[in-house]
Amino acid sequence: MNIWNKIINLIFPINCLYCNKENTYICNNCLQKLKQEILPNQSHVLSYKNHKQLIHLLKYKNIQSLKVPLGILLNEYFKKNIDPNKQYILIPIPLHKKRLKVRGFNQTQLIAQEVTKLNKNIQINTSLKRKIHTKQQVKLKKQKRLQNAHNIFYINDISLRNKNIILFDDVKTTGATLNSAKQEIKKLRPKTIKVISFLK
Ligand SMILES: [Zn+2]
């Protein structure tokens, strides 16, 4: 570390979230250990309880460099959970454009993009859109313009027909968001849809 980096590190210390090693948010040792935690036959990469700070730093503290280790971990999940002889389309859950404007990036899409650099079986597709801002949803419900309050996404990409789809969100809470998106994508008659989250 040069003197300037030392000063920066004193003012804004960066330490491994797991072992406190300096100058990195996840050191290589801890990244290797995290890979061991990823199990086959799960619908999430890591547990929310033990790892919520990973997504929190990316999403709310704007630490976009975390997309790289998170992409590595998501790829590790795919190595254990998808058929290496098939091609998959990875669809990140979108933000509403108003929220995207405020945050400046979609954390779920950033992680998904990283994984496509590492895994030739996976392509990203961003044609899923969020048609209702959370605030508007209440308004629309009152006006009875929506038959279903969970009907918050739209997609119209016929290239997804007969494809293997993986729908991806950063955090799964109730599952309502992922389920709503899944129902919308189903209309395009893909071959399979797998629904996963980074944390659950
Ligand atoms: Zn560490």
Image: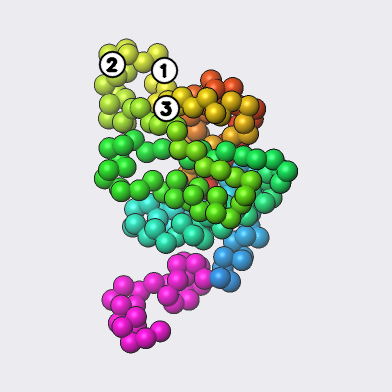
Gap between marks 2 and 3, in whole Å?
18 Å
Residue 140 found in image quarter: top left
| Residue 198 horizontal/vertical position (percent) | 52, 48
Magenta-span inclusion, residue 177: no
Residue neighbourhood size for the residue with mark 3, other residues' Cα within 10 Å, grouped as few (<14), some (14–19), many (≥20)? many
The magenta stretch is 1-27
Residue neighbourhood size for the residue with mark 2, other residues' Cα within 10 Å, grouped as few (<14), some (14–19), many (≥20)? few
Along the viewing direction, whichever of 64 and 18 lies nearer the viewer: 64
Along the viewing direction, whichever of 195 and 120 lies nearer the viewer: 120
Which residue is labeled 2 in the image?
A: 142
Above or below, 44 relative to 64? above
Front label number (2 vs 3): 3
Instruction: Determine whether, in the image, residue 109 is placed left or right of residue 167.
Output: left
Q: Residue at x 30, y 48 (%)?
A: 103
Report the number of numbered marks. Answer: 3
N-terminal-most mark, 2 or 3: 2
**Residue type at mark 1?**
Asn
N-terminal-most mark, 3 or 1: 1
Magenta-span inclusion, residue 13: yes
Residue neighbourhood size for the residue with mark 1, other residues' Cα within 10 Å, grouped as few (<14), some (14–19), many (≥20)? few
Secondary structure at numbered mark 1: loop
Image mark for residue 148: 1
Which residue, as the protein is rendered here, is positioned at the far bottom? Answer: 3
Image mark for residue 6: none
Image mark for residue 153: 3
**Residue type at mark 3?**
Phe
Secondary structure at numbered mark 3: strand
Gap between marks 2 and 1, in whole Å?
11 Å
| Residue 88 horizontal/vertical position (percent) | 62, 39
Front label number (3 vs 1): 3
Along the viewing direction, whichever of 119 and 59 lies nearer the viewer: 119
